[in-house]
Image (cartoon, helix red, strand yellow):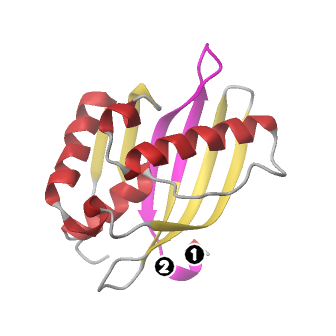
């Protein structure tokens, strides 16, 4: 795999924390609709790089794994530090010039309190070739019935695997 630069890091991180889908909740269960609403609220905060709000959608011990660059962050403090570094690095992701395009998403319920959401995406970067990836989220239902992200893992893939 080629060595990833700053823009690739920003791309991968942003794709992990942003799911820029605007899919309607039609045809999905009430549970999936609630999960999608949470993801959309999270993505809205992420698109503004509003880290304080982003953290409200994550469990305190949330784990973030990025297979493209080897990052592993756990907990709000490490996530805040990591995302602040991405924001400070500039580039098309941090500036908002580049956004992921979701090509597919699946919901898989694991009992009543956990779900796995897999999103395939294409990331259009100005003046560069698109990048493709898959992000897997594990959601956990909280005692107050809210869904929070407890684990996220992103991997770069070939274009055909992201479709």
Q: Is residue 24 visible?
A: yes
Give the number of the disc on residue 4.
Answer: none
Residue name at image x 71 percent, y 45 percent: 108
| Residues at circles 1 and 2 in contact by the CB criterion of under 8 Å | yes
Q: Which structural element holds mark 2?
A: loop
Location of residue 13 with respect to 97 vertically, above or below = above
Compare residues 27 and 71 and report the one nearer the observer.
27
Residue 18 falls left or right of residue 67: right
Magenta stretch prevailing secondary structure: strand
Query: Pointer 1: residues within 10 angstroms few (<14), some, or many (20+)?
Result: few
Location of residue 24 with respect to 109 vertically, above or below = below
Residue name at image x 82 percent, y 41 percent: 29
- Relative image position of residue 125 (x, y in whole percent): 35, 77
Quadrant (top left, top right, bottom left, bottom right) of the N terminus: bottom left
Does 154 appear in magenta? Answer: yes
Read off the residue under disc 2.
Answer: 158
Q: Which structural element holds mark 1?
A: helix
- Relative image position of residue 72 (x, y in whole percent): 30, 44
Q: How many marks?
A: 2
Residue name at image x 39 percent, y 47 percent: 46
Q: Magenta stretch?
A: 136-161
Read off the residue under disc 1.
Answer: 161
């Amino acid at each position: 795999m080629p060595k990833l630069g700053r823009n690739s890091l920003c791309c991968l991180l942003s794709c992990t924390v942003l799911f820029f889908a605007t899919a309607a909740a039609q045809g999905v269960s009430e549970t999936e609709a609630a999960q999608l609403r949470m993801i959309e609220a999270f993505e809205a905060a992420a698109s503004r790089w509003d880290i304080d709000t982003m953290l409200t959608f994550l469990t305190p011990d949330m784990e973030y794994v990025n297979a493209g660059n080897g990052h592993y962050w756990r907990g709000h403090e490490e996530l805040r530090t990591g995302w602040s570094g991405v924001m400070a690095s500039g580039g098309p992701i941090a500036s908002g010039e580049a956004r992921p395009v979701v090509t597919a998403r699946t919901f898989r319920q694991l009992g009543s309190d956990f779900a796995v959401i897999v999103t395939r995406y294409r990331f259009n970067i100005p003046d560069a070739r698109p990048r493709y990836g898959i992000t897997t989220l594990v959601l956990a239902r909280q005692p107050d019935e809210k869904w929070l992200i407890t684990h996220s893992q992103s991997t770069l893939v070939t274009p055909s695997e992201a479709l």
